């Protein structure tokens, strides 16, 4: 079942600012879907439109295969969501804040206990919110999103600013929600966390989707070779002219060559024919960060076609 589907979704502010430019993507039931993009790319605006906080300029949204204002209003009752900065009363306890949330959502307070258990805050529920660490505040926000036992949970930068332990806790919570059958939509700039947590991603740049699909498919598109030679400049120049090179860039003393195939021996032979003899050659797994940088960096370092 398709949980989220957008078709040519667009948001324009005035005549000059096009925040979201005709994006179309789908999230299927059970996916942990990462929504990635640089700052100002349109992530938060898109979430605002999904949650009916921001009115689209044009395009369509379907939630749980529901369409139209009346049906979407009912569909959104099946969604729990957090925004980047948790918004709770600082002098109320965690439990009291969740009682406020339950009252607003018209949800029985009996749902609060399981939500606190799910984020490991039952033992600190009577502490004032202002005394919580950042990680605890984020976890309380997720508990607030889970009170209504939602089928879809939308999380906006849930691990932003957290230390490694806090990120691990959020990662475990997301996995737990997914294991319980929920669909998760995560907006984040923490690519390593997304790669470890999500099953699928969409990457947005300047308001447009530049790629979407499973992480496995995305990172398997090309092979990556890590190479070194005494003359790095000559190595880069030669690698740029290799026909199977998709992208070449330098990382410190290393040069990374993204290839259309995994034939590292052919790369080594080609470089040798150009008088460049390698001191190191090894494959490197393509990470989500590698692909993200390739798709969102304005200046292309090099490509085989342009050399």
Image (tube, rainbow, N blue to C red):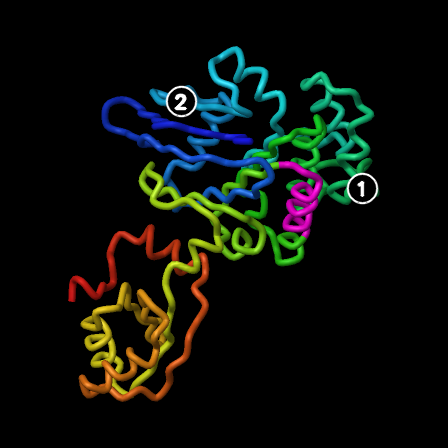
Residue at x 75%, y 35% (from the top left corner): 115
Q: Is residue 133 left or right of residue 16?
A: right
Q: Position of residue 36 (x, y in %)?
A: 44, 45
Viewer-nearest residue: 152 or 159: 152
Mark 1 or mark 2: which is in front? 2
Q: Residues within 10 Å of mark 1 (few under 14, many from 20)?
A: some
> Is the C terminus in the top left, top right, bottom left or bottom right quadrant?
bottom left
> Is the N terminus in the top left, top right, bottom left or bottom right quadrant?
top right
Q: Is residue 70 left or right of residue 55?
A: right
Q: Is residue 22 above or below residue 184?
A: above
Q: Residues within 10 Å of mark 2 (few under 14, many from 20)?
A: some
Q: Is residue 106 left or right of residue 189?
A: right
Q: Which residue bears the numbered disc 1?
A: 124
Viewer-nearest residue: 193 or 6: 6
Which label is found at residue 263? none
Viewer-nearest residue: 82 or 203: 203
Q: Position of residue 202 (x, y in %)?
A: 43, 43
State the predominant SS element of the stretch in magenta. Answer: helix
Give the quarter of the image for residue 269.
bottom left
Residue at x 50%, y 30% (from the top left corner): 4
Give the quarter of the image for residue 87.
top right
Instruction: Determine contact: label 1, label 2, CB under 8 Å.
Output: no
Give the quarter of the image for residue 179.
top right
Report helix, strand or loop for mark 2.
strand
Residue at x 26%, y 81% (from the top left corner): 232
- The stretch in magenta equals 169-182
- Please say whether residue 180 is one of the residues in the magenta stretch: yes
- Please say whether residue 218 is one of the residues in the magenta stretch: no
Residue at x 43%, y 58% (from the top left corner): 219
Q: Is residue 294 above or below residue 147?
A: below
Q: Which residue bears the numbered disc 2?
A: 60
């Amino acid at each position: 079942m398709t949980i989220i589907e957008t078709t040519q979704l667009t948001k324009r502010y005035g005549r000059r600012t096009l925040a979201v430019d005709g994006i179309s993507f789908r999230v299927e039931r059970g996916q942990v879907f990462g929504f990635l993009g640089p700052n100002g790319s349109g992530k938060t605006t898109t979430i605002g439109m999904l949650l009916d906080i921001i009115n689209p300029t044009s395009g369509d949204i379907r939630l749980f295969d529901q369409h139209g204002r009346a049906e979407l209003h009912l569909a959104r009752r099946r969604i729990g969501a957090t925004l980047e900065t948790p918004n709770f009363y600082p002098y109320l306890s965690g439990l009291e804040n969740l009682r406020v949330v339950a009252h607003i959502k018209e949800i029985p307070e009996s749902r609060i206990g399981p939500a606190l258990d799910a984020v490991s805050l039952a033992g600190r529920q009577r502490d004032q919110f202002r005394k919580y660490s950042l990680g605890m505040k984020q976890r309380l926000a997720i508990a607030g999103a889970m009170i209504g036992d939602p089928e879809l949970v939308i999380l906006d930068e849930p691990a932003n600013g957290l230390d490694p332990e806090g990120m691990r806790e959020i990662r475990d919570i997301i996995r737990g929600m997914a294991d319980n059958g929920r669909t998760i939509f995560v907006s984040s700039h923490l690519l390593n966390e997304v790669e470890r947590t999500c099953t699928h991603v969409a990457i947005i740049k300047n308001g447009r989707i530049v790629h979407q699909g499973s992480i496995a498919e995305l990172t398997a598109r090309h092979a990556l070779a890590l190479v070194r030679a005494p003359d790095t400049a000559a190595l880069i120049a030669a690698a740029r002219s290799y026909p199977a090179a998709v992208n070449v860039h330098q990382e410190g003393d290393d040069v990374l060559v993204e290839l259309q195939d995994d034939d590292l021996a052919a790369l080594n032979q080609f470089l040798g024919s150009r008088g460049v003899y390698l001191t190191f050659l090894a494959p490197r797994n393509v990470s989500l960060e590698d692909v993200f940088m390739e798709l969102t960096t304005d200046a292309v370092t090099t490509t085989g076609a342009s050399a």
